[in-house]
Image (tube, helix red, strand yellow):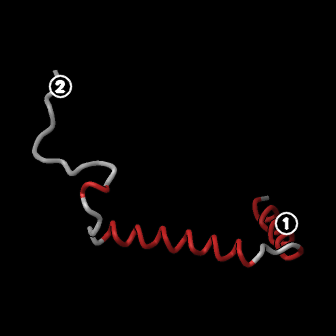
Amino acid sequence: MNNLIWLVRAARWARNPPSMKMVIMVFSIIAFALVLAGLEYFDLIPEWAQMEPARRGRGPMIR
């Protein structure tokens, strides 16, 4: 059933393809995400720009 949905979606795209601006925008967003992932992988993002700070030692004890 899921294959039929993808076939209908592909047929709709073939009849009405996206504009070149939309294609460029989507590929630029994907490229930006890949650059960020690469920076994170190689640990080139500074600590102040990360969502969670690096853990130092043990956390507070909860009783």
Dot 1 surroundings within 10 Å: few (below 14), some, or many (20 or more)? Answer: few
- Residue 3 is drawn in which quadrant? bottom right
Q: Mark 1 or mark 2: which comes first in sequence?
A: 1
Q: Which residue is mark 1?
A: 8
Q: Type of residue at label 1?
A: Val
24 sits left or right of 7 in the view = left
Residue 30 percent coordinates (x, y):
54, 71
Side (left or right) of 26 relative to 61: right
Image location of residue 29, percent across then percent down: 56, 69
Q: Is residue 51 above or below residue 6?
A: above
The residue under the point 16% across, 21% down is: 63
Instruction: Please give left or right for residue 8 compared with residue 29 in the image.
Output: right
Please indicate whether residue 8 sits to the left or right of residue 59 in the image.
right
Callout 2: SS: loop
Tell me what residue is drawn at x 13 percent, y 29 percent.
61
Percent x, y for residue 56? Answer: 13, 47
Amino acid type, residue under disc 2 in the picture: Ile
Residue 44 placed where, x, y %? Answer: 27, 69
Q: Where is 60 relative to 45, above or below?
A: above
